[in-house]
Amino acid sequence: MIIYLYGPDGYRRQEKLKSIIADYKKKHSAFAVERLDLAESGSLNKLKDFLKSQSLFDKLRLGIIEGYRELEDGQLKEFAGLLKENADAKEPTLVLLDEKAPNKDFKFLLEKPTLAQEFENYDYQKFGIFIQMEAKKRGISLDSESQDLLAQVYNGNTWGLITELDKLALLDEKKITKVILDKHLDMSLPLNIFSALGQMQSARGVGARLSILEELFHRSQDAAMIFNMSSVFVKTPADKEKMADYDVAIKSGKLEYEEALIDICLESRM
């Protein structure tokens, strides 16, 4: 059997993987788990050995596979063949993790008997609901302003959101307001990013804006966070629409976050 978990939301993919492993532990008294990163040399041969071997002591084997896109063309075809050969097998179970939707040579993974589940980035509304649920799990509550700020800062970055919520859960305050969140973010970020973005917005010269952006890149090393947080400073409907266009271009693969931010500085849209 093959379970195919794909899409850009890495946090939710990993949470699904954890639930699969936990479910197997409940249902089976003994099982073996092997993780295979196909980006590593010799890993494809290890996979072949895993598929052929059968332990007398392990009632079930679970193979967790990632990194297959790093294989060369010939190896990719071989890997696709191995998956097809084992698609109907009851044992072992293969869990394939993938950051993107499959290309044409792997479209069969979206069809039965494979169990496929996609983990797209949430839209703004669903992301807000997700934030509420994860905050509740950690025993904290967010007012509407703090939730909106987190949604803007971590849009498309659930790992970053979860890390931030874990930090907030350690605070004495359990009811998080925007004032508390602003203070906490200022303390936790390596640079007062709110102040820097405000300076970038007010700077008249292109050189000054690019200089601030370069410092942000150097300090935070997270262009996605810088882009998402910059949306807090967008005021006019026209500029909000332009930021939305950048967001679509990034998520469709036409632009990188760094390219969008540089373009924003050149056009002075922030």
Image (cartoon, rainbow, N blue to C red):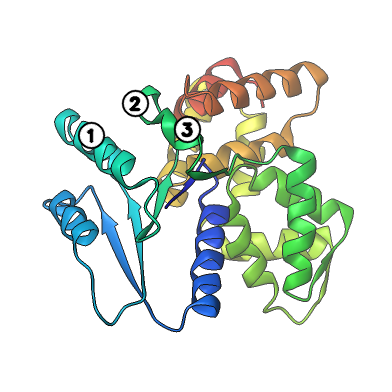
Q: Nearer the viewer, residue 76 or 152?
A: 76
Label 2 CA crowd tier, 10 Å (few <14, some 14–19, many 20+): few
**Closer to us: mark 3 or mark 2?**
2
**CA–CA distance between discs 3 and 1?**
15 Å
Q: 162 or 238: which is nearer to us?
A: 162
Q: Could you tell which of marks 1 and 2 lies nearer the N-terminus?
A: 1
Residue found 21% across the figure and 55% down from its top: 47
The image position of residue 256, as x and y in percent, is 45, 28
**Judging from the image, what secondary structure is the residue with disc 1 in?**
helix
User: Height in image: 246 above or below 129?
Assistant: above
Judged from the image, the secondary structure of the residue bearing numbered disc 3 is loop
Q: Which mark is residue 76?
A: 1
Quadrant location of the C terminus?
Answer: top right
Q: Nearer the viewer, mark 3 or mark 1?
A: 1
Left or right placement of residue 98 versus residue 137 in this view: left
Q: Which residue is mark 2?
A: 105
Q: Residues within 10 Å of mark 3 (few under 14, many from 20)?
A: some
For badge 2, the amino acid type reads: Asp
Residue 106 has which mark? none
For mark 1, does the 10 Å Cα neighbourhood hold few (<14), some (14 to 19), or many (20 or more) residues? Answer: some
Q: Percent position (x, y) of residue 78?
A: 19, 36
Q: Image point 34% across, 26% down: which residue?
A: 105
